[in-house]
Amino acid sequence: MKSKKASSFHEFARNTSDAWDIGDDEDEDFSSSSSSFQTLNSKVAKATAAQVLENHSKLRAKPERAQSALGDMPTNCKVIKSSSEAQLSRTSEEACVRTPLQKQQSLPLRPVIPLVARISDQNASGAPPMTVREKTRLEKFRQLLSSHNTDLDELRKCSWPGVPREVRPVTWRLLSGYLPANMERRKLTLQRKREEYFGFIQQYYDSRNEEHHQDTYRQIHIDIPRTNPLIPLFQQPLVQEIFERILFIWAIRHPASGYVQGINDLVTPFFVVFLSEYVEEDVENFDVANLSQDVLRSIEADSFWCMSKLLDGIQDNYTFAQPGIQKKVKALEELVSRIDEQVHNHFRKYEVEYLQFAFRWMNNLLMRELPLRCTIRLWDTYQSEPEGFSHFHLYVCAAFLIKWRKEILDEEDFQGLLMLLQNLPTIHWGNEEIGLLLAEAYRLKYMFADAPNHYRR
Amino acid sequence: MAQKEVLGTPPEGIHPTYPYKVVLLGSTSVGKSSLAYRYVKNDFKESLPTVGCSFFTQMLNMEVATVKLEIWDTAGQEKYQSVCHLYYRGAHAALLVYDITNKETLNRAKLWLRDLEKEFLPDEIVIALVGNKVDLAAEREVATEEGEEFARTRGLLFMETSAKSNYQVNDIFMAIARELLQREQEKARAPSPHGRSTVTLGESRVRTGCCRL
């Protein structure tokens, strides 16, 4: 029987290989799918802990090396020190120290990124032209995508560390569950779903000016020009009309939530990714009038369906009183109080409430905190991870918060803290930062997901 | 706030600082964020719809004290109101913002007022009614007198503003600060049996007055 569970720290490291960047990720013996991320049990955790402890004792032999690594590694790893839980925390601290060690050595020199982040610039961290490793990865994707029946587990596994932009549109359609794994059914499905969407438009869109839908439409109409106001692509009337239709149809088909501000942002990554299939570069300045109507209709319908799939998983974020968000903000607070007591107490001391900054993190899935290219990279993983948007996001938020622990602890009043938390400096972020963030989030989930008592105080 | 010093007749050289929490409330897209941004940064830009809330501060040096306004800008969509509630708790002042080119937004402001009146006693909070977007005079749907009259009957401060053309934005915040200080002064005076304070607070009018300048 194939092992379905990740059974070692090595597997964990491999799963997050874009962050560590250690060796190749063609692990033929690692047969598990993304479902393994979820099912780590305590036995596995113990085995891992034991192994990490062993590694730790080896490391102890060269204390000066470990020390220097700790000195310049991402701050998020230091958090564990503040936790008083001996066993697990200690081991994970070492886990955390250990891996970036290798990462630190392979960090390339980073060129300056332009201040205005370009969404088309997927390798924002200034990665060199495609490496052999990247070519191999792309090849692997192409192979998976062109097989008669795409192995979705395998596709998730490959996508977790990031999807190459060349194959991202089709990969996203598959990962979101919109496109069937079976090659022969794809064309027909796409055709049928696209027709279905435009059927909705025909049937419902005229009702936008009727009394019972007026408020919904008005709100959408007001918000669309305010969505991504600095990117020329989104100021084109054709694009704005597409967004309006997508959001209106979604809203009236989901009366329990309807349209809530924030949902408008969620169309953007899908639209940009599906558009990128037809645009070589400079997507943010592209004039969509250059595309045929058929192509635009496909992009619109695909964006609608993929966004719908996403929202299906997080609808309680947007129903009355937004219980999903309240719950997640609470969970974030509990989690942070466990993983970084110092930051948590700092907030308490200055009367900062998590809701004051994290509401937006949940409501807009961190989209307001990150450049669009980073959101797109983040969603590669969210769509590969079971319950990525509804659950894993919580750990990403925790990792994101702890990433700024130094800056947070440096602020000595409520005002400074709020200003910082509302304007976290991520403008230069690219794939590398997101990779590290995801690795840390995965580690947190691994520690706490199957041990809820660890984060319940 | 407990640590606040009593504002009576401050001895020579003592210039106390008072922090006040001010919330911006009102319908979607009436210009709440733009007012805050204009006031704090003296600039106007296209802003994203506010999600949850955002926070700004501004220090004001008044004759008798320094006032620190902690401005909470809230989301306008009604769906968020369950959350907004958390933000206006403990507020010292509220700006009820409407858009003079959209009559419906004044009605919403009146509903906000009703909510506030449930939450606060009249002397607990300074409330200002603000008709924004006077730069769009051609599209006006709400007459100045209408806002003014409503404010007068309900004892609210009132002003029309334009965040875009920077019209009376400073003035409304200043009027609120004066009113807050004035009340501080009254509070300080009330328990004292001795005469009146000699501190004057500019020409801030009592709260039934309209403060259009």
Image (cartoon, rainbow, N blue to C red):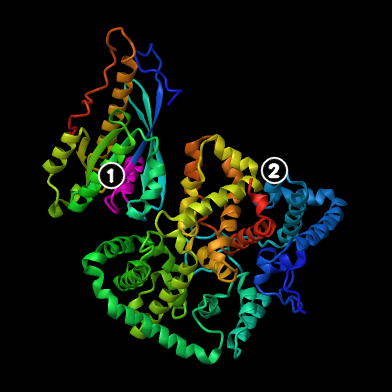
Chain ID, mark 1: B
Percent of width and height locating residue A412: 55, 35
From the top left corner, tell me how far across and down residue B68 is, in percent. Answer: 39, 31
User: Given the image, on which type of amino acid does mark 1 rest?
Assistant: Trp
Is the residue marked by circle 2 packed among few (<14), some (14-19), or many (20+) residues within 10 Å? some
Residue that appears at 58% across and 58% down:
A396
Q: Quadrant of the N terminus of chain B?
A: top left
In percent of width and height, residue A268 lies at: 42, 68
Which disc is residue B112 wearing? 1
The residue depicted at 77 percent of the width and 67 percent of the height is: A7
- The mark found on residue A82 in the picture is 2
Instruction: Tell me if residue B60 can be seen.
Output: yes
Q: Is residue A378 visible?
A: no
* Disc 2 chain ID: A
Up/down of A303 relative to B194, above or below: below
Q: Is residue B121 magenta?
A: no
Disc 2 secondary structure class = helix
Which range is magenta?
Answer: B24-45
Camera-side residue: A40 or A8? A40
Please tell me which residue is depicted at 31% across the width and 45% down the height of the picture: B25
Gap in angstroms between the C-alphas marked 1 and 2 = 44 Å
- Return the x and y of residue A143 as percentages of the image width and height: 63, 86
**Quadrant of the frame with the C terminus of chain B:** top left
Amino acid under label 2?
Answer: Ser
- Asked if disc 1 and disc 2 are in contact, CB closer than 8 Å, the reply is no
For mark 1, give the secondary structure: helix
